Amino acid sequence: MSIKDDILRLKEERNAIIMAHNYQRPEVQDIADFLGDSFALAQKARETDADVIIFCGVDFMAESAAILNPNKTVVHANRESRCPMAGMVDLRELREMKAKHPDAKVVSYVNTTAETKAESDVCCTSSNAVRIVEKIDADEVIFVPDRHLGEYIRSRVPDKKVILWPGYCHAHERITPEIIRELKEAHPNAEVMVHPECPMETIALADHVFSTGGMVNYAGESDGEEFIVGTEEGMAYRLKKLYPEKTFYPVEQSICHNMKRIHLEDVLRALETLEPVVTVPEDIAERARKPLELMLELGRSD
């Protein structure tokens, strides 16, 4: 019996669902019940009837699933799969910033720790960040932690003051304008899709700016046949699998090694042991749940 067979058997026995982010290894994507971006994963975690959620993604994603599902068992497939950007927020400095800007609302990217979410008014993902900043009842917004996504929001919501935190995503900072120019020269007929975590100089060269979920939707709807995929390279695998008649060119330099820490053996071990269970102290979880739930409410399309 193969490791995949063992996973499928145990998943049924445990009444478990395997959720994976679009940047996971191909073999992990292949055994997932649900693949998606951060917003879609948060929605699905809230909707599932499964007793157990096996989460294949970085730590903040598993934390969010646990916060939104206090009565379910959420197991992180590999505790070492962590998001460096989520750790870039210093809570003392954030509180000081809030004190300096008492009329500002704190919008925290979902790529943050539970403790940061607990200090926030609302969370957002890359797919709904602009919409949430537009909708939130404040003229001044403290946006943490991704400065590039914050700069993109500024460009789209010019009537609000967006105060930035100096965080960034290692994988998306590697997607430089030079790399995009080289890919465009090599593939002149390809449409360029980039993630809003990229630097603004890179975004300026793109035809479209999308979350990974947005890339999935657009590639399926577009009449285009070739696409440059300006996000973590694992995204191209999912796109190629969904639309085999189309051609996708990844940015091979953009690799999130933290996402790639999860292997099939980790998923099997998680199903066998139901460990490590994701736990968030109740006082923090209660405070963090409110901005997450508001994200799900405000983040829907009108």
Image (cartoon, rainbow, N blue to C red):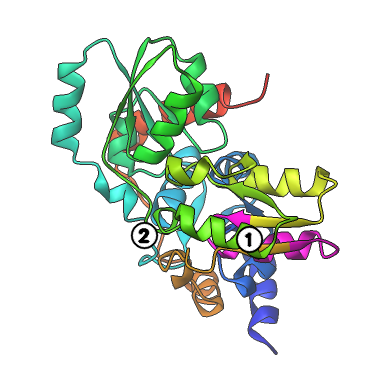
Q: Position of residue 190 (x, y in %)?
A: 72, 55
Quarter of the image with the C terminus is top right
Residue 72: in magenta span: no
Q: Position of residue 117 (x, y in %)?
A: 34, 34
Residue type, label 1: Glu
Residue 144 or residue 67, whichever sits in front: 144
- How packed mark 1 is, by other alpha carbons closer than 10 Å (few <14, some 14-19, many 20 or more), is few
Q: Decide if residue 283 is on the left or right side of residue 148.
A: left
Q: Residue at x 76, y 65 (%)?
A: 241
The one nearer the camera, 201 or 53, is 201
Secondary structure at badge 2 equals loop
Q: Is residue 161 above or below residue 149?
A: above
- Residue on which disc 2 sits: 82
Q: Is residue 289 left or right of residue 245?
A: left
Of 286 and 153, the residue lying toward us? 153
Query: Compared to 204, does 274 lie above or below?
Result: below
Q: Residues within 10 Å of mark 2 (few under 14, many from 20)?
A: some
Q: Which residues are magenta?
A: 229-247
Q: Is residue 56 visible?
A: no
Which residue is label 1 attached to? 185
Q: Is residue 283 above or below residue 175?
A: above
**Whole-percent x, y for residue 174 in the image:** 41, 59
Quadrant including the N terminus: bottom right
Q: Does the CB distance between marks 2 and 1 fall below 8 Å?
A: no
Distance, label 2 to label 1, CA atoms, is 35 Å
Q: Report which quarter residue 225 is drawn in.
A: bottom right
What residue is rendered at 60% in x and 39% in y? 43
